[in-house]
Image: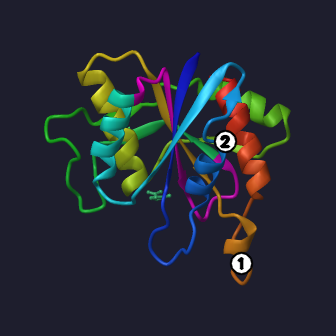
Amino acid sequence: MEKVLLTGFESFGKEKINPSGIVAKKMHGRNIGGRKIISHVLPVTYDCGKIIHREIEDIDPQYIVSLGLAGKRNQITLERVAINMTSENKKIFEDGPDAYFSLLPLEDILKELHKNNIPARISNFAGTYICNYVMYYTLHYLRYNDLDIKAGFIHIPYIPEQVLDRDLPSMSLETIERGIEIAVRAL
Ligand code: PCA
């Protein structure tokens, strides 16, 4: 059976929870269209690169879908590109290329999400924080080790309980979960 390494993140900053880690954990062990989900919740630190590297070696997946929270966005956003830059204005890998494109079939995933009435779009900027870092690190690792694994990153919005008293967009955990399931089927 094909394996999908599905990662999410622990909470960070002032947020008490991170829906990306919740969704990843909930989906662990599921069989989605003949693909087995193996989840891992990563810390929001630069250690997550090495952890994902170890997970790839241990699990030997055919796909890697990494999830993260993008709090101010109101749609599921399929990240197209990871850049070789951190929020400290440093390169992630000194000798790495400027950017990597996602290896996931973004247009197909988007079409399926829309068919199922889930708000989504392709994003051309994953930020410069840990989400961009983990996407870049993963794609760089795959390129340098010549591994044929389809990998990419998906940002998700806040869930309602995170914005009760804030004027910010949110999406229900159930909708996000359904969206990620649809994305896995479309890989
Ligand atoms: N979102 C942050 C890091 C962890 C997360 O869930 C980001 O977009 O970089």
Residue 12 in picture, x, y percent from top left = 45, 69
Q: Tell me if residue 154 comes above or below residue 21 in the rendering.
A: above
Q: Tell me if residue 56 comes above or below residue 82 in the rendering.
A: above
Residue 45 lies in the magenta-colored region: no
Q: Residue at x 59, y 23 (%)?
A: 105
The residue tagged 1 is 167
**Residue type (three-letter) at the residue carrying disc 1:** Asp
Q: Is mark 2 within 8 Å of ligand 1?
A: no
In the figure, is residue 114 to the left or right of 143? right
Quarter of the figure with the C terminus? top right
Q: Tell me if residue 145 comes above or below residue 25 in the rendering.
A: above
Residue 176 in picture, x, y percent from top left = 72, 49
Q: CA distance from mark 2 to mark 1?
A: 22 Å
**Residue type (three-letter) at the residue carrying disc 2:** Arg
In the figure, is residue 117 to the left or right of 142? right
Q: How is the image coloured?
A: rainbow
Residue 121 marker: 2
In the figure, is residue 106 to the left or right of 100? right
Q: Residue at x 48, y 20 (%)?
A: 62
Q: Is residue 136 visible?
A: yes
Q: Secondary structure at mark 1?
A: loop
> What is the magenta range?
59-76
Name the N-terminal-most of marks 2 and 1: 2
In the figure, is residue 146 to the left or right of 68? left
Q: Is mark 1 within 8 Å of ligand 1?
A: no
Q: Tell me if residue 130 comes above or below residue 72 in the rendering.
A: above
Residue 43 marker: none
Badge 2 local density, few (<14 within 10 Å), some, or many (20+)? Answer: some
Q: Residue at x 74, y 56 (%)?
A: 173
Figure quadrant of residue 20 = bottom right
